[in-house]
Amino acid sequence: MKQPSLYIPHGGGPCFFMDPADPNRPASDPMWQSMQDYLAQMIERLPERPRAMLIVSAHWEEPDFTVHKGDRPDLLFDYYNFPPHTYSLSWNAPGAPELADRVAHLLSEGGFPVADERERGWDHGVFIPMKVARPQADIPVVQLSLRHDLDPTAHIAAGRALEPLRDEGVVIIGSGMSFHNMRVQDSQARTPSLLWHAALNDAVMDDDPQRRSARVAAWDQLPEARFAHPREEHLLPLMVAVGAGGSDPAWLDYDDAVRGWPVSAYRFG
């Protein structure tokens, strides 16, 4: 069955695994509980178990789109100042080199220069949410980088080139955060974050696919855009998901708040 494309929140660092007594099971932190519950049901809510997952994380940027072709990557603990036990988590998902070749081929056909690599571990934008969503780590994963120019139109076009994978049993997942300004206090964030949240939801949920792509590509013109994203790497995975969504309808898949900041997830198809 055709799989959707998704844009999901991945939380903050290892936020779902802060219990040192049982570090490989999600902890029940009230601040992150609703997001954890959403992620825990993500795979079960798909049309069927996917053949593989293509994940675009906010935490990997390269000059050109780069496809991970490793067989079974390690984990990359790319977060800082967290408890020691969070640097020994495990999530041993297999890679999918044949799918990685297919991803590279589709991007090349779409006119993009494509690089590949085999040594980098899954970063926390991959393994933290997916450890909640699929703790048994039994679905193969291919990770695709962002392009470090963070051009929204290019990322939407890349997603569009990858849309055929959805008919091949592959779920395409953009992993980021719809609000990502960690420097502001909760009281400072509430009003501007609500304005941003409403404007982003309205753009993403536009029922005309071409207009939706254009509005999302112009994200920095939305109210409080640069307050919500001083740097947009956590929003760019949404662009890939929008492009891969093609002409399918958009759904607000998750909508809640963390520390008073609204956070959304979206599903296309």
Image (spheres, rainbow, N blue to C red):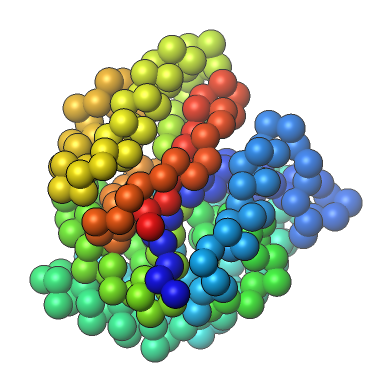
Q: Residue at x 78, y 46 (%)?
A: 27
> Where residue 263 sits: x, y (%)?
49, 34
Q: Quadrant of the N terminus?
A: bottom left
Q: Residue at x 15, y 48 (%)?
A: 210
> In the rendered image of this protein, does residue 170 appear above or below residue 131?
below
Residue 139 in sight here: yes
> Where residue 187 sits: x, y (%)?
53, 11
State the residue in front, 115 or 100: 100
State the residue in front, 72 or 203: 203
Q: Quadrant of the C terminus?
A: bottom left
State the residue in front, 217 or 68: 217
Q: Residue at x 36, y 33 (%)?
A: 201
The reply, left or right, for residue 265 in relation to residue 147 is right
The reply, left or right, for residue 185 in relation to residue 194 is right
State the residue in front, 73 or 235: 235
The reply, left or right, for residue 169 in relation to residue 246 is right
> In the rendered image of this protein, does residue 103 appear above or below residue 130?
below
Q: Residue at x 61, y 52 (%)?
A: 39
> Where residue 59 sits: x, y (%)?
43, 53
> Where residue 18 sits: x, y (%)?
75, 45
Q: How many marks?
A: 0
Q: Residue furthest bottom?
A: 98
> In the rendered image of this protein, does residue 189 appear above or below residue 268?
above
